[in-house]
Amino acid sequence: MEICTVGGFEEVGKNMTAVKVGNDVILLDAGLYLPAVVELQEQEIQEEYSEKLLRRIKAIPNDLVLDELGWSDKVRAIIIGHAHLDHVGAVPYIAHRYPNAEIIATPFTMAFLKTILRDEGIEIKNQMRVVKPNSTLALKGASGNINLEFIHTTHSTLQCIFVAWHSSEGTFLYTPDFKFDNYPVIGEPPNYKRLKELGKKGVKVLIADTLYSGTERRTASERIARNLLEDAFSFVRDKNAAMVVTTFSSHIARLKSIVEFGKRTNREIVFLGRSLNKYVNCASEVGLCPFYKEIKILRYRKQINSFLKRLNSERGKFLVVCTGHQAEPGSILDRMINGETPFQFHSADHVIFSSRNGCKNSNRHSCFRSRRKRRLA
Ligand SMILES: [Zn+2]
């Protein structure tokens, strides 16, 4: 078994790991390095995103190293752990290099990948295979089957998986980003039972990666975040003040809580922006968006601006949900605050940040900040 740490081992983002057993290679994740993309957006370069451009700004994993190793034509699968851009965002630009590789992901992740392919106007010819969390798959390899297993875990978006390859040389286990949550708001707790079984049986290599893995403290369950949110909502008493909630667009469980508490305010709930639109539609497509009918989503700048003009005079009528909690330049909240929309904040207005405090170097709708990789072999 050989492992190539293609991307994401020295930076937060552009995750990609390649594993080779015999003449078969699988790729785990193909993500973007979001700070580079954000920088590009800030420079307002009008060039269309292409593989060449993204390589130049180092926004995608340097998978050309696989050519040097002679691994590229042996890649049988590209498996995506979950629907964050630092795990899936590079697929549209690199998949063509591996025509014999299937792209494998859970329904939500695959729906998200298809959405970004459509939005970017990119077609890929690879076979796309949707797998359920807690399932197995035998792929045809150069010499016998490649036995894969997808183990359900909890994280901050839907249908996240750990990937195991039960090879002739032992089990390789990849656990990209997770938060062990025993009380998730959507879905089941992690599949501890299976993880324990794998541990007992023995794992040859584990590549574990998650936010705050270097911090010795437990991250609270999503139920706690939900309670904090409910508490924040309870402080909004001015029925004529504007009310804005900002959070992660990929965090469907959090959005569900926001809508539930939002309904109690008797305000019309309006989601603003493309990124929210993408994730919410994907969740709805796979039947995991229970609040879909309760909300209105505005996606285009023109629509958003005319809505914000209305909000300016009917402040108490709406509850706005948008991105921008990290002060991402160009996000809706950023533009609202900077007077780039027809809306002006008043001192009585409420803005609820359902996220951690802002951080300069953080990524957009992704996994954030100082993350440490631990590689155990
Ligand atoms: Zn993530």
Image (spheres, rainbow, N blue to C red):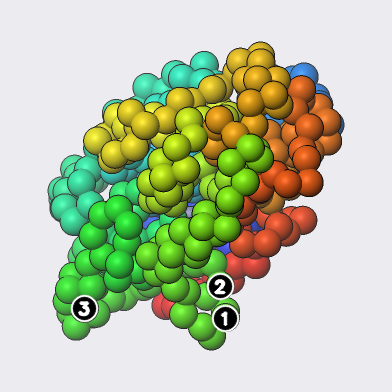
- The residue to which callout 1 is attached is 215
Q: State yes or no: Cβ of the residue under disc 2 lies below 8 Å from any atom of ligand 1.
A: no
Mark 3 Cβ inside 8 Å of ligand 1: no
Residue under pointer 3: 196
The mark lying in front, picked from 3 and 2, is 2
Q: Quadrant of residue 337?
A: top right
Q: Residue 126, how many percent across, how many down? A: 35, 28
Left or right for 162, reference 57: left
User: Disc 2 vs disc 1: Cβ atoms closer than 8 Å?
Assistant: yes
**Does residue 254 show up?**
yes
Report whether residue 60 is seen.
Answer: no
Marks 2 and 1 sit apart, C-alpha to C-alpha, by: 5 Å
Q: Name the N-terminal-most of marks 1 and 3.
A: 3
Is 157 in front, or is 162? 157
Horizontal arrangement in the rendering, residue 375 relative to residue 252 (left or right): right
**Sequence-first tag of 3 and 2:** 3
Report if the CB atoms under discs 1 and 3 are less than 8 Å apart: no
Q: Position of residue 275 (x, y in %)?
A: 54, 33
